[in-house]
Amino acid sequence: MEGITGDLVRIAYLVAFALFIVGMAGLTSPTRAVRGNRIAAVGMAIAVVATLFDQGVGDYALIALGIVIGTVVGVPAARRVQMTAMPQMVALFNGVGGGAIALIAWAEFRRSGGDITNLEIGVPLVFAAIIGSISFWGSNIAFAKLQGLISGTLKIPGGLFVNIGLMAAALACGVALLAGSDSELLFILLLVFAAILGTLAVLPIGGADMPVVISTLNAFTGLSAAAAGVALDNVALIVAGMIVGASGTILTNQMAKAMNRSIGSVLLGGFGGQAGGGAQAGAEGEQGTVRSTSAADAAIQMAYASQVVVVPGYGMAVAQAQHAVREMTKELEKRQIEVKFAIHPVAGRMPGHMNVLLAEADVPYDQLKEMDEINGEFPRTDVSLVIGANDVINPDARNVPDSPIYGMPILNVDESSSIIVLKRSMSSGFAGIENPLFFNDKTQMLFGDAKGSVGEIVSELQSL
């Protein structure tokens, strides 16, 4: 009977793996993303149920209690979270995964009586504990930064050497355990050193780099899960962990390339501190004079345009202006005006942030243009409407070698015939630097809440 059950569990795992892969393939297209997510969720449900039939699974009462607690906490949190807070939730949920892996490694160490000298089990167990703890605490710091609980960056003198020392200390504890020590204190110290490392590694990293950090920590969690799967001889955990680790690594690499930065420079603490205050509306700065406009003037400019490009940023997310933007595009399309959306890979606070917001507002997928595709369109664009974007349109990234963002690919908004920027104030973006585009002779600033400003433009368009 046990052999039959084992075979059924393995077959269920194979089905789950197939659904994981099909689901991941669906996520490559916005039109198939929802279905792909559901398919992968079904695969995960099958894997969980199959694992419960494993003969050595343990205490079912504790498992049931964990499911109940997780459901009570997780479902309401996921349903109530605003789209603006989705990056924080991704960081938090990823951290929970890493913390779970670290605790599993600790529990397995205790179950073995402290004997992990079998390197086939001990090495992946130590690896899972270290990486899981780093991921948990690093993700918590990322969450706190995105949530505004921690402001600015904290650079520790000699931080690189401190981090190297912490990693060396964690590895030394691991080596001692693998060599035969059964001291639980050593295992706890291993987790503590890794926790401090995860905390200190993320604290110096600024907001502009946070999407890359979240993606990197996601990959770490996947790798730690795969290592735990090796130690526990759980095929489902190995495969699921490797899928998460591989996809997170690929995404991290793509994000770093989109910013023209190495992953190492991000993890060593890069640009992007707390957004500082800039000149106020209408003030004269070193770059020149800011020109303000009104919703009526903006509506007239767009009403007589042939092509309008909307450039969304985090400001649109904060204001929840995506539905108003959709209404505006409908009004423009009634006048046979071509409307496109320019999506920068790191606009917002996580990969795909703008795509998700605009999809929520039923903006057609074919109007969403990635950076490489849309940049050639700006020279023939009559009006570019920037809604809350900053660093991703800053021409200093092309023109000023001393700029912290120099070399980062940007949206070439400055090549448009006319530029209208919707912002609350002249405050800087995540990189904490001034944007000369706002002082450009072709640029006009429409100050105020983005949702309200777009709503006024819609009203003006309807009255024309």
Image (tube, grey):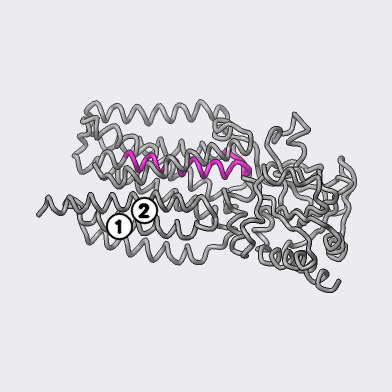
Q: Residue at x 73, y 61 (%)?
A: 450
Q: Which residues are magenta?
A: 204-227
Q: Is residue 353 placed above or below 404 in the rendered structure? A: below
Magenta region, main secondary structure: helix
Q: Pick the quarter of the image with the N terminus.
A: bottom left
x and y percent of residue 303 in the render?
Answer: 84, 63
Q: Secondary structure at mark 1?
A: helix
Q: Is residue 235 left or right of residue 283?
A: left
In this figure, which residue is indicated by the disc labeled 2?
19
x and y percent of residue 323 in the render?
Answer: 66, 66
**Which of disc 2 and disc 1 is earlier in sequence?**
2
Magenta span has 119?
A: no
Q: Is residue 346 placed above or below 49 in the rendered structure? A: above
- The residue positioned farthest toward the bottom in the image shown: 463
x and y percent of residue 79 in the render?
Answer: 49, 66
Q: Is residue 461 left or right of residue 79?
A: right
Residue 425 visible? The answer is no
Give the quadrant of residue 354: bottom right
Q: Residue at x 53, y 63 (%)?
A: 81
Q: Are marks 1 and 2 in contact (CB under 8 Å)?
A: yes
In this figure, which residue is indicated by the disc labeled 1?
46
Instruction: Report the disc number at residue 122.
Output: none
Q: Is residue 463 placed above or below 336 in the rendered structure? A: below
x and y percent of residue 316 in the render?
Answer: 68, 58
Q: Secondary structure at mark 2?
A: helix
Q: Amino acid at mark 1?
A: Ile
